[in-house]
Amino acid sequence: MVSYGVITPIEYLKGVGPARAEVLKAELGIHTFGDLLRYYPFRYIDRTQFHKIERLHPDMAAAQVVGRLIQLEERGERGERKGRRLVGILKDDTGTIELVWFQSIAWLRKSLQVGGVYVVYGKPQLFQQNLSITHPEMELYQRGAKEIGSMHLQPVYSSTDKLKKLSLDSRGILKLQAALLETLSSQLDEELPDYIVNLHRLMPLRQALTAIHFPRNQEELGQAIRRLKFDELFFIQLKLLKSKLLNTQKFRGHRFEVVGERFNTFYHKHLPFSLTQAQKRVIKEIRKDTASGAQLNRLVQGDVGSGKTVVALMTMLLAVDNGFQACLMAPTEILAQQHYQSITRLLRNQIASVQLLTGSTPRKDRRVIHAQLEDGSLDILVGTHALIEDAVKFKNLGFVVIDEQHRFGVEQRAKLWRKNAIPPHMLVMTATPIPRTLAMTLYGDLDISVIDELPAGRKPIKTMHLYENSRLRMFGFMKEEIARGRQVYIVYPLIKESEKMDLLYLEAGLETLMKEFPLPHYRISVVHGKMPVKDKEFEMQRFVKGETQIMVATTVIEVGVNVPNATVMIIENAERFGLSQLHQLRGRVGRGAEQSYCILMSGSKLSKESKLRLETMVRTNDGFEIAEVDLQLRGPGDLAGTQQSGVLNLRLADLTTDQALLTEVRARVIKVFQEDPQLSDLRHARLRQYLSQKEPGISWEKIS
Ligand code: ADP
Ligand code: MG
């Protein structure tokens, strides 16, 4: 519950005033009392944990020492910006260590006091035989100072140069927090229903907000953090699940009453293989949704090769059986074509009518397609985002499948949504496995199905990691596979920052290849992002048709392309790719019955992280396991699709480490809505109030 005190503008806080308020707003986004209160320390100085200088060594991740700053001087030439640095020497009773700064030199010279005793925090490193700490955090050590100085756990807030100039360094911010808590203490009302606080054994909110800024001990701090993380996750889930509820209540869905003839004929007569258990389960889940009378919004996750296309096709047939049209949208022309081909192949020109619509569909064909869509004679339309153009009108669109979801924005989804008076069911398919916790947070408004099983008989791809000195061995291996009639991908990195170098590198590699694999015996395709689209498509098609045996490419082939005869994926400079990208690339092979291989080529100098990435690739083929490692390495902010979501601006909770808490929270929110969908129960008054305040645009009261 937001009380008046919390929304008071920050300039009214004792000790702030207009000048500081301006800077607090501009630098930290702190506009109100509440904003400041939620500006949490990013770490705590544990005053029981100091290291002696002689004990420091470069393997420590970070260390805290206390000592006297006995010297401070600038080194390096004046005019020359690069080498300019500020060097301090810190001394305790066991030795000295250098402190080095390359930035904010003028400011630091003014504010640091030679002769002062400091608490210094940072990572010790060895540079030219000397132990030093670069850009350490510095805090004057005030032994015996009342209150703040006597705290065992002293909070550290991040600050900026501009704030520091107004004496709002970490300590300055701490003083503001003290003033704030004094002003607000009687007004920090509980936000959660009391019964939830009790059931989950949560520290009361007022106490938690005090303790996170002024913890008395580690135990209290831990409880405070748990409480505040709980709230953070709780309210995100509350909003997500509420909008899901809104969707299902506001939007009636087309009811697919029957499993009809087309579906059954296809299943019993056409399907050239038997479905995996996972495919069956997912089709059942979709079938259940579409029969319910509510609109379906479901995400289907399945690793590359798990057979998502046939699931999409069968659910589209379900729509057709019930008198509706269906469409499937893919992110690129080549993928749309492949879907179209595999669907027409599976249907063998029977059962349902299918057309392909992309940017390069000739105008006269387009006109025919438009007409067929409007008179209802076309059942299934496959295509690219050409599908969402206004000219494309359906007679009765009932089911939409979107492949490789993260390439499409929310806006595009909405456009498809509006192509029928009652919005069509939406099925989103992605081959980028998203760890469960992240999926729950990101797609809380979608239901999730997982195809967690590959078709039987697939041989797991064998992955190995080779260094440059094994290149000849690699060429030999390629020749063997090509002699067996197989095809090979060779992928080079190409990123914006180093585009020119990357292209040169690709060209050099290509030259070597052409010598090693000469015409006319060998034929090579080249595809990279800098080529005109037409040429790209042409080269791609040559490889797809088997006219070339080697495809040299940048990551343009990453998504979805299906050439079952390709059995070798070679990735050059593999250390430069992210894990999920490596996994996507590897997924281009292993699509047929033959044994497939992935060879990761790398330089010999590898960072710890690159090593872990390559080792992970060699160890496992499991996309979900890889996604977990990726999440731990990079954090959720970098994962595909998370940027626009806006739900990841978490202050405290960490989706990597707080999975158990998130599960607990989500289960609670679900229970709340199950027991009281309208939140009309008196127990839930606070939640109801929270939702109506935070989103004035949606009138919560109207749903009933
Ligand atoms: P993805 O999930 O990566 O989109 P696809 O749908 O392209 O995978 O399927 C990959 C290949 O596996 C296709 O050639 C498809 O026909 C085949 N396939 C799909 N399901 C099965 C199954 N149950 N048994 C055997 N092969 C299957
Ligand atoms: Mg696919």
Image (spheres, grey):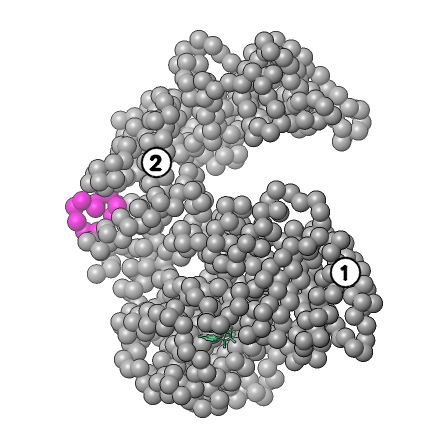
Q: What is the total number of numbered labels drawn onto the structure image? A: 2
**Label whose residue precedes the other's in the sequence (1 or 2):** 2
The residue where tag 2 is placed is 226
Q: What residue lies at 56% left-to-right and 74% top-to-bottom?
A: 592
Task: Say which of 19 and 382 sits in front.
Answer: 382
Whether 397 is among the magenta residues is no
Name the secondary structure under disc 2.
helix
User: In the rendered image, which quarter contains the N terminus?
Assistant: top left
Q: What residue lies at 58% left-to-right and 73% top-to-bottom?
A: 594
First to last magenta residue range: 678-689
| Residue furthest out toward the right | 515
Density class for disc 1 (Cα within 10 Å; few <14, some 14-19, many ≥20) is few
Q: Is residue 445 left or right of residue 604?
A: left
Tag 1 near tag 2, CB within 8 Å: no
The quadrant in which residue 698 appears is bottom left
Identify the amino acid type marked 1. Leu
Name the secondary structure under disc 1.
helix
Q: Is residue 601 above or below residue 66?
A: below
Magenta stretch prevailing secondary structure = helix
Which tag is nearer the camera, tag 1 or tag 2? 1
The residue where tag 1 is placed is 472
Q: Is residue 369 left or right of residue 688?
A: right
Identify the amino acid type marked 2. Arg
